[in-house]
Amino acid sequence: MKEIDWANLSFGYMKTDYNVRCYYRDGKWGELELCSEETLNIHMAATCLHYGQEAFEGLKAYRGKDGKIRIFRPDANAERLQSTCRGILMPELPTEKFCEAMKMVVKANERFIPPYESGAALYIRPLLIGTGAQVGVHPASEYMFVVFVTPVGPYFKGGFATNPYVIIRQFDRAAPLGTGTYKVGGNYAASLRANKMAHDAGYASEFYLDAKEKKYIDECGAANFFGIKDNTYITPLSTSILPSITNRSLMQLAEDMGLKVERRPIPEEELSTFEEAGACGTAAVISPIQRIDDLENNKSYVISKDGKPGPISEKLYNKLRAIQYGDEPDVHNWVMVLD
C-alpha cells in the first residue's frame, strides 16, 4: 500500500481491505461475514432501488495516544438504525450484532486507522438495504447489512473554523412527520439541489427552516443546529430533524459544564440573539457558524463578530474530541475500546 498522507486526507472514499456483510433471510439474521469485494450483487427489482428501503449510519474509530482504538457510541448508532428500520419496515439489527460488526470491520482494516494527532479518523459506514425482488409497493423479504470503512480528514477544509450558511426557502429536506427523523438516503437526495445552490453561492452549506410554516430553524444541511446564549445550549425540537448522536453528546457535555440545555422551536428572528452557534454531526463534530444569510429578506445574522469560533463551542469541541481519543475520562461510557 502506498504511503497515506494522513495530514492531507479529504473527506472521501478510499479503498480499504475488507467490509463486513450480514444477510436477513427466512425471517432471521445470519452470521457476520468478512468480504474483500467492493461491489454488491443485487436483484434489479430490489426494494432499495425502487422504493427507498435503505438506511445508513455514520460513526468513527480513533487511535489514541496510548495506541488503543476507540469507536464512539456504536450502541447509539445501532439504536438509531433500529428506529429507522421501524420507520420504513425493515428488520431491526440487534445492537449486539451491530457492535460486533463495527469491531470486526475496524480490526480487519486496522492499518487504515490514522495515527493519533493527524487530524484524521477512520469513518465507518453501516448500510442496510432491501434486496428482495418486489414490484408492488411492499417491504422486501430479504435484506443485506454491509459495513465499510475509509480514512477521512476534516469534513470542512478549514477544520475547526467558522463558516457562512444561507437560508434556502425554495426546498425542504423533509416534511414534518415524514422521514426526517430517520437516516434514509431519500432525505439526502432531497437536499442535493439546495446544497449545490448554497455551495455555488460561496456558502459552506444550506440552512433549512421548518417545512410547515417556514418560521423556525430546522437543520443545517445534513447537520443539527445549536445556538448558545445566556449560558444556555439551545437546539431545535422538531418532527423532521434527524436525532444527531453528536448533538446528544454535546447536550450532555454542556450540562456537565454547567450550561442549561433547551430543546425547543427556535424562531428565525432569534438567530440575531445568539452569542455562538454551530452545525454538529459525526463528519464535522462542530462546524462553528460565522453568519447565516437570509438573501430573500435581505438579512444577515452575524453570529461571530470576529470570525472566530466562540469559547463555549471550542470548549465543547475539544472536550468531545478528547473523550473520542481517550485523552479524557469517558465518564458516560460512550467509547467502545477494542481489545
Image: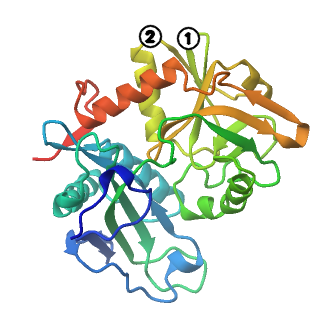
Element under label 1? loop
22 or 140: which is nearer to us? 22
Q: Please state which of residues 331 and 116 is positioned toward the viewer in this rendering.
A: 116
**Residue located 49% across and 55% down the image:** 84
Inspect the image, locate mark 2, and give the three-letter code of the amino acid beneath it: Gly
Residue 76, given in percent of the width and then of the height, sits at: 36, 43
Q: Residue at x 51, y 73 (%)?
A: 139
Q: Which disc, if any, is residue 258?
A: 2
Position of 262 compared to 248: left or right?
right
Query: In percent of the image, x 44 and y 71: which residue is there?
Result: 129
Which of 314/254 is in front?
314
Q: Nearer the viewer, residue 3 or 90?
A: 3
Which amino acid is tagged 1?
Answer: Asn
Estimate the spatial distance between the alpha carbons at disc 1 and disc 2, rounded to whole Å.
8 Å
Residue of label 1: 231
Position of 246 with respect to 334 (left or right) is right
Q: Give how far across and how far down residue 20 sits, in percent.
A: 26, 68
Circle 2: element type: loop
Question: Please, is residue 229 above or below residue 152 in the view?
Answer: above
Quadrant in the rendering for residue 111: bottom left
* Disc number placed over residue 221 in the picture, else none: none
Dots 1 and 2: beta carbons under 8 Å? yes
Residue lying at 42% horizontally and 85% vertically, measured from the top left: 42
The image's colouring method is rainbow
Whole-percent x, y for residue 211 in the image: 76, 47
